[in-house]
Image (spheres, rainbow, N blue to C red):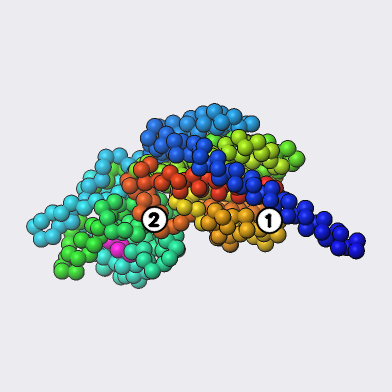
Amino acid sequence: MKKFILFLLLFTAGHLFAQSDSAFIRKVYDMALSKGNAYEDLRSLCKDVGARLSGSAQAQMAVEWGEQKMKGYGFDKVYLQEIQVPKWVRGNKEVCWIHVGQKAIPVKILALGGSVGTNGTIKAELVMFNTLDELKKAKRSEVEGKIVFLNQAMNEKDINTFKAYGGCYGIRAHGAAETAKLGGKAVVIRSLAMPVDDHPHTGSLHYEDGIEKIPAAALSTKDCELIASHYAKGKLKLTLDMDCKDLGMVTSYNVIGELTGKEKPEEIITFGGHLDSWDTGEGAHDDGAGIVHSLEAMRILKESGYKPKHTLRVVFFMNEENGNKGGMNYARIAKEKGEKHIAALESDRGGFSPKGFSCDGDLAKFQSMFDFHKLFKAYELSEFERGYGGVDINPLKEHFPGITLFGFVPDSQRYFDFHHAESDVFEAVNKRELELGCAAMASFLYLIDKGL
């Protein structure tokens, strides 16, 4: 009889806690959808500040914008963390033509982030490869003195578009180095994008020590189709002019805000996104949405009256796109200061409809604390599984063994329509989808904080 009474008490307590959690999550969603600031904050970041490439005047304005927003929302602590970031500039607009017989046809192109310039105009015969592996297997005589065209498309059969992106990421990251090893003069790649359209997509490349740095750029997918069709009929030449430059390292900042924990203030849960963006578009999905998800989640938790057990720290990381100096230095400084980091959450996959969260760590430990699926079923969140946390928070693993990292997972189908392109603007973000993401982030943080 005593055992039965004990079981009944435990069951009743657990049921009441579940009811309490459910009621709080409902409150969070109501606040995000009816009294939210997310959409206006994203508009302000995109329109009042604009594109925010590391080291630029706009990046500094974004730092000031973030600091003012956090202070305006009354977070317990708001401060800047000084870091050094690379300053790469695109310079004058890139120009490119293909030569079909006596006819020159202009094509749309963007220099890849970190690329060297052409130092004048380059004109050379074009040689096409369908994959990076094809290029690696080529003879030097096939490439030397030519411009390489890597025409590898993202796999449209992959349901998760991030998998498709990963499948051809190598042409952007390593295409220049592999071309240079064979004596090529420059490389142009097919943009890492799902649709066939007129928007080229930029992104970082990686040069190799001891290998000549050559110019590298991305073509719009529509122009890649055009070039491939002409290439099949005979030899082509390509003219390229790019004025980009590396101006070394400059000072910038991570922007940090905190709500102090009431029970374990020394234990920190970090969450955030990256404040920088490429210099095309407005960085609305990448990663303005992640910034606003995190800012709004903290605001909602504070204004709901929730008193966190642990210190909740929101971080706007600088320089994820071309160096990750914000993430790496944040983790290093945290270790040097002797801080205790127990979990981290990142949003850097766009502002689309939320589907769930990925976990890099002991997922079973968290599922034993609370039942994700039951609490989030009404909000159409169903994906809680192993996966990647995020670029900015990943360095925490090196300095804090055992930390669990989480990544916000929205629908992926349209993300690579906009990723690193001029089309990544405020108007591309749906207000309701953005607000649902904010509510999901706030609710998930609440559960993490309660469960640890």
Determine whether the residue tagged by mark 1 lies in a helix, strand or loop: loop
Q: Look at the numbered discs 1 and 2 and tell me whether their residues touch, using CB distance below 8 Å.
A: no
State the image coordinates of residue 251 (x, y, percent, origin top left).
49, 34
Residue at 88%, 63% (x, y): give it.
3
Q: Is residue 390 magenta?
A: no
Residue at 26%, 65% (x, y): give it.
128
Q: Residue 36, relative to residue 23: is it above or below?
A: above
State the image coordinates of residue 250 (x, y, percent, origin top left).
46, 35
State the image coordinates of residue 166 (x, y, percent, origin top left).
44, 61
The mark total stands at 2
State the image coordinates of residue 225 (x, y, percent, origin top left).
24, 62
Q: CA distance from mark 1 to mark 2?
A: 31 Å
Residue at 55%, 60% (x, y): give it.
383
Q: Which residue is denoted by mark 1 in the rendering?
A: 370
Q: Residue 333, relative to residue 404: is it above or below?
A: above
Q: Which residue is denoted by mark 2 in the rendering?
A: 414
Residue at 31%, 67% (x, y): give it.
130
| Residues rendered magenta in the picture | 148-152
Mark 1 or 2: in front is: 1
Drawn side of residue 335 relative to residue 101, left or right:
right
